[in-house]
Image (tube, rainbow, N blue to C red):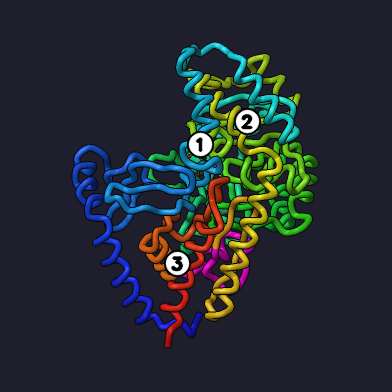
């Protein structure tokens, strides 16, 4: 990292930012209108961007177009939702047919049985309920863990995001100075509005360290209702589990009577047909899904053991929602899961991803960039750290935020729509072609060559 010329990076950042501004004049004007009606001019704070967000108009297959008419190959894919490609005709036909039959009843329809059956087949958990987002899925899973155990404390992994309800808005992206000891991290609320009482009930542990978990269990195991975790971390770049880690987590949670929740909002339906659960072969008590599982529509689900299903069925734990299992969302989910994202598609994702990751790796090596690649299924990223990451503290101290931001600008200015920030990854869709992959590599090559030119 020392060889990187920081003055050059600053100059390139300025030049790319200028190019970005010039390309996105209509977005700038839209931003001014949007500011009058939405904080930061966006529907969700994850969509903010400096100097303004890129407002999109439409998408088709692997492409999206912004309000300036710029065409991009979409590797952002709606934060990992659109594995089916934009305006997918099979999902579109299923949704259109459903529209003509009525779109909402708040009564069960055939679609929910079809989707639950498919999720059972893919993920192996016997019982499923539906929600409207990843946040609702993880919220219901936390209720279930607490209701099943009669305990209040929830453990989560330091540096993980599980949505925006109170219990999990703790130790999401805490700053370095707030972390506390690695084996006893401080519980840090993620923004205002989270009561201290809730923050104190959520405790963080480092990822990829089963012995740290064991020592927390030794101290407070009897108070812990559940451990919620992404089996492979996907909100601080991608951090896969070390071999054997998830098995040990499963053993420990079973030993202490703690419900294990795999938050597969990102990994589910993207890294294999049965997500991380099938890929790593460790079965949790609950799985939370959303994003890619519902064909581009706002929905989610929770998979659960028979024991947990029983306390939903008898009303011990309340699992509710007017729109849960909405027929339109179920039509999209059924078509996406059974017609589009069939099991063989995951082999294709794996192969396409491998060639994209290999291409990035060759560019990294050729230019001596302090970076490496990570990828699983449809998900991949260049991590701007020479060393691999194993947990959040590595991410905080090793990832070069300046290079990450500059790479993003190069991608956007070269027609690659990418997730902003240092923490995200790309998501492939069935629509990505060899040409699309090459466009990504060309943008990355331009970045790498400029950054390292002497
Ligand atoms: C792992 C994980 N869990 C939960 C959520 C929350 O999902 P949603 O934004 O649908 O509420 C996200 C969102 O990015 C996520 O990445």
Tell me the residue that label 2 is attached to: 302
Describe the element under mark 2 as helix, strand or loop: strand
- Which of the marked residues, 2 or 1, is nearer the chain's N terminus? 1
Residues under numbered marks 2 and 1 in contact, where contact means CB atoms less than 8 Å apart: no
In this rendering, which labeled residue sits more in front, label 3 or label 2? Answer: 3
Q: Residue furthest bottom?
A: 454
Q: Give the quarter of the image for residue 389.
A: bottom right
Q: Position of residue 188 (x, y in %)?
A: 48, 51
Query: Which segment is the magenta one?
Result: 382-401
Label 1: element kind: loop
The reply to whether the residue tagged 3 has its Cβ within 8 angstroms of ligand 1 is no
Distance from the alpha carbon under mark 3 to that under mark 2: 39 Å
Dot 3 and dot 2 residues touching (CB under 8 Å)? no
Residue where numbered disc 1 is placed: 88
Q: Position of residue 25 (x, y in %)?
A: 22, 55
Location of residue 84 in the rendering, given as x and y in whole percent from the top left corner: 55, 40
Task: Find disc 3 in the rendering and name its residue.
Answer: 443
Q: Residue at x 74, y 57 (%)?
A: 211
Task: Tell me: 412 left or right of 343.
Answer: left
- The answer for how far apart the CA atoms under marks 2 and 1 are is 25 Å
Specify whether residue 160 is in view. no
Q: Would you place residue 147 above or below residue 44 in this image? A: above
Q: Residues within 10 Å of mark 2 (few under 14, many from 20)?
A: many
CA–CA distance between discs 1 and 3? 26 Å
């Amino acid at each position: 990292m020392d060889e990187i010329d920081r003055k050059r990076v600053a100059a390139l950042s300025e030049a790319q930012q200028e190019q970005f501004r010039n390309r996105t004049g209509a977005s700038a004007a839209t931003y001014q209108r949007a500011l009058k009606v939405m904080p930061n001019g966006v529907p969700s704070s994850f969509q903010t961007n400096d100097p303004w967000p890129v407002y999109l108009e439409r998408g088709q297959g692997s492409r999206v177009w912004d309000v300036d008419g710029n065409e991009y190959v979409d590797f952002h894919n709606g934060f990992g939702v659109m594995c089916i490609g934009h305006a997918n005709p099979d999902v579109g036909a299923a949704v259109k047919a459903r529209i003509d039959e009525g779109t909402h009843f708040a009564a069960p329809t055939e679609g929910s049985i079809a989707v639950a059956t498919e999720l059972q087949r893919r993920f192996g958990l016997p019982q499923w309920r539906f929600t409207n987002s990843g946040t609702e899925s993880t919220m219901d899973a936390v209720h279930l863990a607490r209701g099943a155990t009669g305990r209040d404390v929830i453990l989560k992994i330091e540096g993980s995001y599980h949505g925006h309800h109170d219990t999990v808005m703790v130790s999401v992206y805490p700053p370095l100075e707030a972390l506390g000891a690695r084996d006893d991290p401080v519980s840090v609320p993620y923004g205002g509005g989270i009561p201290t009482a809730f923050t104190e009930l959520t405790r963080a542990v480092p990822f990829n360290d089963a012995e740290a978990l064991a020592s927390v269990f030794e101290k407070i195991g009897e108070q812990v209702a559940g451990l919620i975790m992404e089996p492979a971390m996907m909100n601080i770049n991608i951090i896969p589990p070390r071999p054997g880690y998830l098995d040990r987590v499963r053993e420990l949670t079973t030993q202490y009577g703690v419900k294990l929740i795999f938050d597969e909002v990102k990994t589910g339906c993207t890294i294999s047909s049965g997500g991380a659960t099938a890929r790593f072969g460790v079965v949790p008590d609950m799985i939370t899904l959303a994003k890619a599982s519902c064909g581009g529509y706002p929905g989610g689900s929770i998979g659960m053991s028979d024991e947990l299903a029983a306390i939903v069925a008898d009303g011990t734990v309340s699992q509710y929602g007017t729109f849960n299992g909405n027929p339109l969302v179920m039509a999209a989910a059924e078509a996406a899961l059974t017609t589009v994202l069939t099991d063989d598609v995951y082999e294709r994702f794996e192969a396409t991803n491998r060639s994209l990751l290999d291409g990035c790796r060759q560019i990294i090596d050729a230019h001596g960039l302090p970076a490496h690649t990570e990828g699983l299924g449809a998900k991949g990223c260049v991590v701007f750290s020479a060393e691999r990451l194993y947990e959040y503290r590595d991410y905080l101290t090793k990832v070069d935020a300046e290079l990450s931001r500059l790479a993003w600008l190069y991608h956007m200015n070269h027609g690659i729509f990418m997730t902003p920030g240092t923490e995200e990854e790309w998501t492939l869709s069935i629509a990505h072609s060899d040409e699309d992959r090459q466009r990504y590599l060309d943008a990355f090559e331009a970045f790498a060559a400029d950054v390292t030119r002497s």
